[in-house]
Structure formats: C-alpha cells, structure tokens
Image: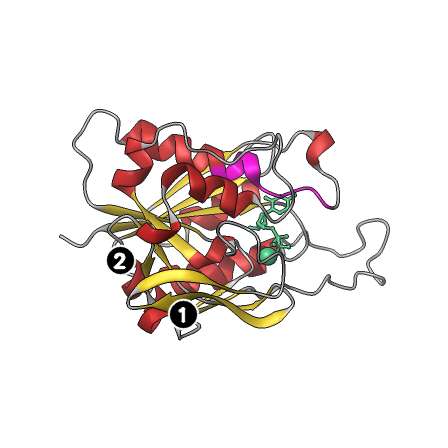
Amino acid sequence: PLPTIYAITPTYSRPVQKAELTRLANTFRQVAQLHWILVEDAAARSELVSRFLARAGLPSTHLHVPTPRRYKRPGLPRATEQRNAGLAWLRQRHQHQHAQPGVLFFADDDNTYSLELFQEMRTTRKVSVWPVGLVGGRRYERPLVENGKVVGWYTGWRADRPFAIDMAGFAVSLQVILSNPKAVFKRRGSQPGMQESDFLKQITTVEELEPKANNCTKVLVWHTRTEKVNLANEPKYHLDTVKIEV
Ligand code: UDP
Ligand code: MN
C-alpha cells in the first residue's frame, strides 16, 4: 500500500484563516492517502474550523492547544505546542500496532504546495529534504548535494545552523517518529529560526538526509505569506441583515 502522508498543520483564528484552509484543502484533496492533522492554536476547537473540516472531504484529525500567552510575542517561534500536539497524536495512534508505512510533514497553512512535492516525500525512508522557494530573504534555499548526499546549505541566513532548512523543507518517516519518542519542538533554549535544526538533530544527521526533488534542484514548495487584510471599513457593530462566516 501507499505510505500515508500525515500533514500536521498549525492554524490560528484570523480574518484569512478560512481562505488559507480552503486553498490547503484544495491541494490536499488531490493527494492520495493523505491524513490531515489540523491543530488549532486555541483553547477549544472552533466552530468555523469544525464545520470546515466536516465538509473538506479529507481524512482528518482536529486537535487544539493554546499557545501560552507569554509565548505570543514577535521574535518567538510560532506553533511549537501545536506541532508537538500533532506529534503526540501520531505516537499515541500508533503505539499498539506495528507501524503502517507513513510519512510526516509539517504543512503551515499559508504556504503553497505543488502536487509533485507529495510524490517526492512519499518515498521518504528516514528523513528527506528539498528546496523551499521564497524564504530566508532569498528566492529559494536548498540543501547542497554531492554524490547523492547533503553536504551543506545554500541559504542567505544563519548558514551556521546544523540544518539550515525551513519547516516546509523536510519530511520524516513515521518509523523515525515512533523510534524517537522524545523528539519534540522545544521552547526553552530554542532561538527563532532554530526550531527545525533543534528538532532534526534529535532524529537524524546531515549525512543521513535523503535529497529529493532531483538532488534538491527543483522548488516544489513556496514559503508564501499572505498579506494582512484591510478591514479599515469594517463597521464597529454588526450592520448587515445576515451573519456571514468568512
Ligand atoms: N500559527 C499559529 N499560531 C500563531 C501564529 C501562527 O498556530 O500564533 C501557525 C500558522 O497558522 C502557520 C504556522 O503557525 O500554519 C506558521 O506561522 P506563520 O505562517 O505566521 O509563520 P511564518 O510564515 O512567519 O514562518
Ligand atoms: Mn507562513
């Protein structure tokens, strides 16, 4: 059987949330054997996301965990608790059975994913890597590959990171997640931009990485970011005759 792709998506309430999730679901719906783990950054599951998922036509799991207030500050890493909740769910679900083949991928709700990316990550044996477009203050970042092995990083930002790679630039086999039960994203001691490195160094080495996307020469995912919407003309009090979810 095809290995299941588990996509962990942290998401939070904001004016563009449903639009982002709609685009993401439209992509995921075209991928075979994908299980979407959507983790709300909230004290409870929201009605908007619950209704959305019920109609999304995708195998999914709906989790929630709020980011502690003290961590909601500019310059601090985002979505740490949510990604860990997704990891915990995966480990819990597979604790009693022999792990079915599976691949885990962290899919932020605002990025852009080509369908080819999923074909590439599906064959991940341990940890696979590939280029990411529009990130790190450059058109792209990528792992440098020689003779089929990752030997360094093309990046414009902190090239000294052990794994100079964005969250969207790697996938991990379920087997590796299960055999490293303590590997999580850390708040303490984790500087911004070091989350990926801190996580990856718990489960793999640079030598072990599997380059995808034609030896990391193709961009199949883009770290797009959505413009903040202009709500300057939004009335202070509800004025319309109907209530509409946006
Ligand atoms: N996110 C979240 N809570 C927050 C901020 C972000 O759950 O307070 C989610 C967001 O929906 C996205 C991921 O974390 O899926 C990364 O956030 P963002 O896209 O803002 O980060 P950036 O693009 O700056 O790396
Ligand atoms: Mn983003």
Question: Regarding ligand 2, which quadrant of the image does it lie in?
Answer: bottom right
Specify the quadrant that holds the C terminus.
Answer: bottom right
Instruction: Judge left or right: residue 189 versus residue 62.
Output: right
Q: Nearer the viewer, residue 111 or 209?
A: 209
Amino acid at dot 1? Ser
Tag 2 secondary structure: helix
Circle 2 residue: 122
Residue 128: horizontal and vertical position, in percent?
34, 55
Q: Magenta stretch?
A: 75-83
Image-quadrant location for residue 244: bottom right
Q: Residue 160 got which mark?
A: none
236, above or below 155, in the image:
above
Residue at image mark 1: 114
Where residue 119 sits in the image (x, y, percent)? 28, 65
> Percent position (x, y) of residue 55?
41, 52
Cα distance between the residues tagged 1 and 2: 13 Å
The picture places residue 192, in percent across and down from the top left corner, at 65, 45
In primary-sequence order, the first of circles 1 and 2 is 1
Dot 1 lies on which element?
A: loop
